[in-house]
Amino acid sequence: MLRLAVPNKGALAEGAQTILKEAGYRVRKDSKELVVIDPDNSCELFFLRPKDIAVYVGEGTLDAGITGRDMLHDSGARVEEILPLGFGRSTFRFAADPGAFASVADLKGRRIATAYAGLLEGHLAEQGVEARVIKLDGAVETAIRLGVADAVADVVETGTTLRNIGLEVFGEPIARSEAVLIRRPDAVESQGLDQLVRRLQGVLVARDYVMMDYDIRAERIEEAIALTPGMEGPTVSPLHREGWVAVRAMVPRKGHQQVMDQLWELGAKAILVTAIYACRL
């Protein structure tokens, strides 16, 4: 039975629940549930703190887990990323009082507060900057105001929280993160894990593509196919109306309205777009 770690709270929890549900797995109905058994998919889901998941997977008997890439690198756990999941995107950046610093080099000898000490220390070592790292358990935004640090390193989604308390982001991003599926490097190959990966990949493709159907005159089919090449090629079927064909193809969700406009200009009719719930390619 596949044993999978899932975030129990925070920004990653909702996205993880949604993608697993779309992939056909049972998810918890109550936030107090710690374990969910999914007999139909031979899977056990363990709901854990997102920052602990990499450690549990690396040290325990769990086969895989969903966590943030930033948390994975911060943990130092012996696990590997096997699939980016496309949600929970953020950046890990420096912030300080406006004008205080311009780059990571300016932080030499200073105090930097963060909830991700491992990730920050690794970055400082790569940059050759010696600074004092002060580890806090979340909510580092007030560290400067309270005199604990000269700068902070924190996860930033929009930067609104930092701006609201008068801080300014500076320098290049320390890291870019998103939700990822992880596993132990020495884990035994598992049919359950392979199935999970295939299903998640199918959901991710389905989110990025739509199905487009349209009718077009036969003499313009090559121009139309150039706009909608599909994956392995579009499906083209003759219509009862002589000289016309029906075309079906997957097209990228982003920009599909422009594709519809271009098809219309070619004389296409009955252009329909439908969402794809899941797929296997």
Image (cartoon, rainbow, N blue to C red):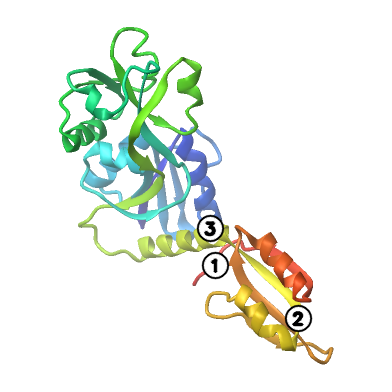
Q: Is 104 in front, or is 234?
A: 104
Q: Is 153 in front, or is 45?
A: 153
Q: Which residue is mark 2?
A: 216
Q: Residue at x 39, y 20 (%)?
A: 139
Q: Residue at x 66, y 80 (%)?
A: 223
Q: Earlier in the sequence, mark 2 or mark 3?
A: 3
Q: Earlier in the sequence, mark 1 or mark 2?
A: 2
The total of numbered circles placed on residues is 3
Decide if residue 238 is on the left or right side of residue 11: right
Q: Which residue is mark 1?
A: 279
Q: Is 124 in front, or is 50?
A: 124
Q: Are marks 2 and 3 in contact (CB under 8 Å)?
A: no
| Alpha carbon separation for disc pair 2 and 3 | 36 Å
Residue type for callout 2: Ile
Q: Which residue is mark 3?
A: 24
The answer, for residue 49, to whether it is visible in the render is: no
Q: Crowdedness of circle 3 by 10 Å Cα count: few (<14), some, many (20+)?
A: some
Task: Give x and y (percent) for residue 233.
Answer: 56, 80
Q: Which residue of the protein is positioned furthest toward the right in this rendering?
A: 241
Residue type for callout 1: Cys
Residue type for callout 3: Gly
Residue 71 against residue 140 in the figure, above or below? below
Q: Crowdedness of circle 2 by 10 Å Cα count: few (<14), some, many (20+)?
A: many
Q: Is 238 in front, or is 98?
A: 98
Q: Nearer the viewer, mark 2 or mark 3?
A: 2
Q: Secondary structure at mark 1?
A: loop
Decide if residue 17 is on the left or right side of residue 107: right
